[in-house]
Image (cartoon, rainbow, N blue to C red):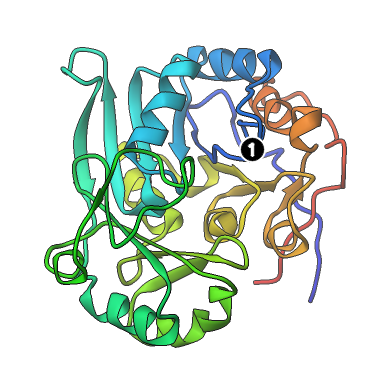
Amino acid sequence: MEITVTTHENVDIASPMLIALDIDGTLLHPNGHISDVVREAIDRAQAAGHHLVLATGRGLDGLLSIAERLGLTTGFAVAANGGLTIRLDRTAPDGYRFANARTFEPATVIQAALSLAPDVLVGVEELVRGWKVNRPFRPGLLNGEQTQAAVVDLCAGPACRLALSAPEIRQHLEALRTTGVTVTPAGLDWLDVTGPGVSKATTLERLRTKLGVSIEHTVAIGDGPNDIEALTWAGRGVAMGHAAAAVREAADEVTGTIDEDGAATVLTSLLRPAAEPAAAQPVEQPTKRSA
């Protein structure tokens, strides 16, 4: 794979940028902590007029709780790995309004998953809030209330995302993809499913067009397999320093780990005058994936 150095000297960072921020492992530590350094960098980037977009695999409940903690009360956010876009609005009764839901019919992939792994836990994310499940997931694995339902009910309506959990279910990744949906691994025992062609990247592209931001003025920061397409899509894709090799290789550059407040380093670099060279990243020099 050809590696070339990527620079951003010609990007006028004084102009509004679309900054896509993963949550878990990027802003949020495994213990639920968000550092003051990251909070302050987000405040400054928002005050500078940039479009800060939380882009997460979390459902609506999990997304809204983090947006509130970060003081993000305006702008857009992407949930369910691209299946759902909301507009944060402090005047709305629940603090948000639906902008877009990219749904699909889940029956085929649910039946395929049950055939391949009969004991699989199936969660269908509701279009409003919460989940319908065939059996309860352990507390903390799904954000939002779980309602147990028969498989026929899980298959009945449109979904914006499925969660599939079973020992080593990742081995069935390609088989499930043949049903036509987007299947993203999130560990050996977990798969996330969205509609055909739906990912963080495709939904962020729609949002970019809506906001009128050029691709050169897009930044994505993430650490997981579900961030790979977004890192490839962005004009500047930045992987966290602790991310797996596949995630780092997909990015233009690598910042510090979450313990080193790597996301804050990137956000701070976007506040510098365009004529001032950006500081070197603390973990690796910027690299560019092959075309």
The residue closer to the viewer here, 140 or 246, is: 140
Residue 174 appears at what percent x and percent y?
A: 50, 84
- Please state, as top left, top right, bottom left or bottom right, where the N terminus lies in the image: bottom right
Q: Residue at x 86, y 47 (%)?
A: 285
Q: Position of residue 51 (x, y in %)?
A: 44, 28
- Decide if residue 289 is on the left or right side of residue 185: right
Identify the residue shown where x is 50% and y is 26%.
15
Q: State left or right for residue 79 relative to residue 3.
A: left
Q: Is residue 237 above or below residue 35?
A: below
Look at mark 1 in the image and give the residue it sits on: 26
Residue 43's image quarter? top right
Instruction: Give the mark count.
Output: 1
Q: Amino acid at mark 1?
A: Thr
- Relative height, residue 80 to residue 140 (above, below): below
Q: Quadrant of the C terminus?
A: bottom right
Residue located 24% across and 39% down the image? 129
- Residue 187 on image: x %, y %: 61, 62
- In the rendered image, is residue 232 in sight? no
Q: Is residue 215 visible?
A: yes
Viewer-proximal residue among 216 and 246 = 246
| Left or right of 114 in this view: 32 | right
Estimate the x, y position of residue 202 in percent, counting from the top left. Answer: 39, 58
Query: Element type at marker 1?
Result: loop
- Residue at 75% from the left image edge and 52% from the top image edge: 6
264 or 18: nearer the eye?
Answer: 264
Q: Is residue 186 left or right of residue 147?
A: right
Q: Is residue 99 above or below residue 75?
A: below
Q: Is residue 7 above or below residue 256?
A: below
Disc 1: CA contacts within 10 A as few (<14), some (14-19) or many (>=20):
many
